Image: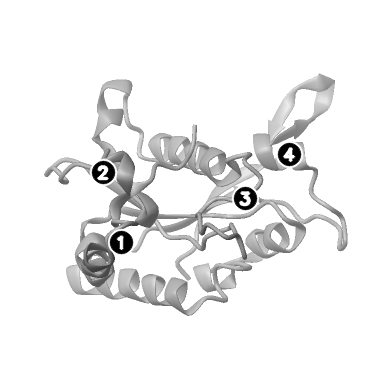
């Protein structure tokens, strides 16, 4: 699978009983000629991490199998037009409306040493490497916090990704980044990822 693009036309209006997960993230494609939210090597790494993160949200919310279809995802690349500049501008200007409908905010953590180390000790989204350094990401976090305060709803800002303290200069095994699991006792694969609340 891959992160859907707006041109895939898979969006629908939000319904009253939907559980809306807003993906707040920084694009990982770097200086690629064609900007994309995932990394440019074709591994669809962010997509895989987001899928596991969404499964963790489903488990946290205790959704039964017949209720899973209530979970919907808002992500800029998918839900804001990527081809028409005017529609894209309108989508960006509607951030507060999208944020007001969100029940959970999910930020994927890139499986690189600095990001994993920061996530292990993070207490707030701005503590995250790469994400917390960008003004737009900080603005999104601020908007969600304000909306939660005004509406007197909980502010459910979560990070998802590898969560342990690697040694300094220890490279993250690429397979661990792709799978989120590592070999453990008796050859069992142990999950090394975590859904972590980042509200303080």
Q: Residue 53, position in %: x, y?
A: 49, 42
Which residue does the numbered mark 4 point to in the structure image? Answer: 176
* Mark before the other along the chain sequence, 2 or 3: 2
Which residue does the numbered mark 2 point to in the structure image? Answer: 19
Question: Could you give the CA–CA distance between mark 4 and mark 3, rounded to whole angstroms?
Answer: 18 Å
Q: Is residue 78 left or right of residue 130?
A: left
Query: Is 65 placed above or below 36 here?
Result: above
Q: Residue at the spot x=67%, y=65% of the render?
A: 118
In this view, the residue in front, 158 or 112, is: 112
Question: Could you give the CA–CA distance between mark 2 and mark 1, rounded to whole angstroms?
Answer: 14 Å
Which is more foreground, mark 4 or mark 3?
A: 3
Question: Could you give the CA–CA distance between mark 1 and mark 4, rounded to whole angstroms?
Answer: 32 Å
Which residue does the numbered mark 1 point to in the structure image? Answer: 154
Dot 1 and dot 3 residues touching (CB under 8 Å): no
Asked which secondary structure carries label 3, the reply is: loop
Q: Residue 162, position in %: x, y?
A: 66, 48
Query: Is 120 placed above or below 14 here?
Result: below
* Mark before the other along the chain sequence, 1 or 3: 3
Say few, some or many: other residues with alpha carbon within 10 Å of mark 2 (under 14 / 14 to 19 / 20 or more). many
Q: Is residue 161 left or right of residue 111?
A: left
Say few, some or many: other residues with alpha carbon within 10 Å of mark 4 (under 14 / 14 to 19 / 20 or more). some
Q: Is residue 31 left or right of residue 97?
A: right
* Mark before the other along the chain sequence, 4 or 3: 3
């Amino acid at each position: 699978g891959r992160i859907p693009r707006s041109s895939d036309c898979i969006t629908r209006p939000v319904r009253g009983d939907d559980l809306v997960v807003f993906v707040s993230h920084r694009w990982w494609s770097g200086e690629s000629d064609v900007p994309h939210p995932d990394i440019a090597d074709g591994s669809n790494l962010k997509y895989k991490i987001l899928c596991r993160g969404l499964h963790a949200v489903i488990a946290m919310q205790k959704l039964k199998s017949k209720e899973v279809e209530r979970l919907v995802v808002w992500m800029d690349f998918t839900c804001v037009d990527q081809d028409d500049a005017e529609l894209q501008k309108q989508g960006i200007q509607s951030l507060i409306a999208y944020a007001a409908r969100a029940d959970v905010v999910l930020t994927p953590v890139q499986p690189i040493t600095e990001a994993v180390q920061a996530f292990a000790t993070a207490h707030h989204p701005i503590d995250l490497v790469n994400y917390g350094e960008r003004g737009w990401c900080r603005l999104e976090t601020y908007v969600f916090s304000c909306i939660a305060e005004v509406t007197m709803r909980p502010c459910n800002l979560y990070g998802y990704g590898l969560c342990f303290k690697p040694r300094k200069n220890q490279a993250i095994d690429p397979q661990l980044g792709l799978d989120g699991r590592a070999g453990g006792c008796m050859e069992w694969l142990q999950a090394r990822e975590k859904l972590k609340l980042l509200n303080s």
